[in-house]
Image: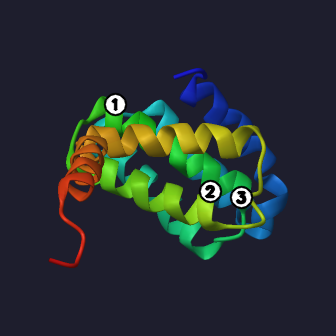
Amino acid sequence: MRFDPALTAQEAFHQAEVELGSDWERAVELEETFSSNAGAIARKAYEGLLALAQCYPNAHSFQAFCIYITWQQATEETIARHFETGIRLCEAYLASREAGAGQDFERIEELYRSFRAGLGLEEQDELQIEYKRDTPKGGD
């Protein structure tokens, strides 16, 4: 990875203040809990941040922040659920026209590939491409 997801998460989080309006204080509380704890307490705060993100689908900095912290979760607790969540968040972010190109967009594309690779999906894609290339096409 060509960037530090933890540092990038903090940058994105601070940019999200204007996006969250009256929910900013709640986001700060959850982020502080997430950052300063571990285990069940951190997981509950993480889930609270993801729930808040669902209320703000067009808050691109906050969405990016959630993707970055999901990568942190996936590296700390390597379970399929974190990778699946990361893929879902990345796909929504990358599909948004407003997110546009830029540094976050490029970083999230990189994380998207990493989340997919974490589930072995990149390997399947290569196999599927080879299968399609070797499969006879129509006719006799």
- Please give the residue where the numbered disc 3 appears in the rendered image: 60
Provide residue 3's location: percent of width, then percent of height. Answer: 61, 22
Q: What SS does tag 3 mark?
A: helix
- 98 above or below 123? below
CB under 8 Å between discs 1 and 2? no
Seen in the image, is 100 located left or right of residue 84?
right
Crowdedness of circle 2 by 10 Å Cα count: few (<14), some, many (20+)?
many
Q: Is residue 116 visible?
A: yes
Q: Mark 1 or 2 closer to N-term?
A: 2
Seen in the image, is 42 located left or right of residue 66?
left
Q: Nearer the viewer, residue 10 or 119?
A: 119
- CA gap between label 3 and label 2 equals 5 Å
Q: Amino acid at mark 1?
A: Thr
- Please give the residue where the numbered disc 2 appears in the rendered image: 63
Residue at horizontal 66%, vertical 71%? 56
Q: What SS does tag 1 mark?
A: helix
- CA gap between label 1 and label 2 equals 19 Å
CB under 8 Å between discs 3 and 2? yes
- CA gap between label 3 and label 1 equals 23 Å
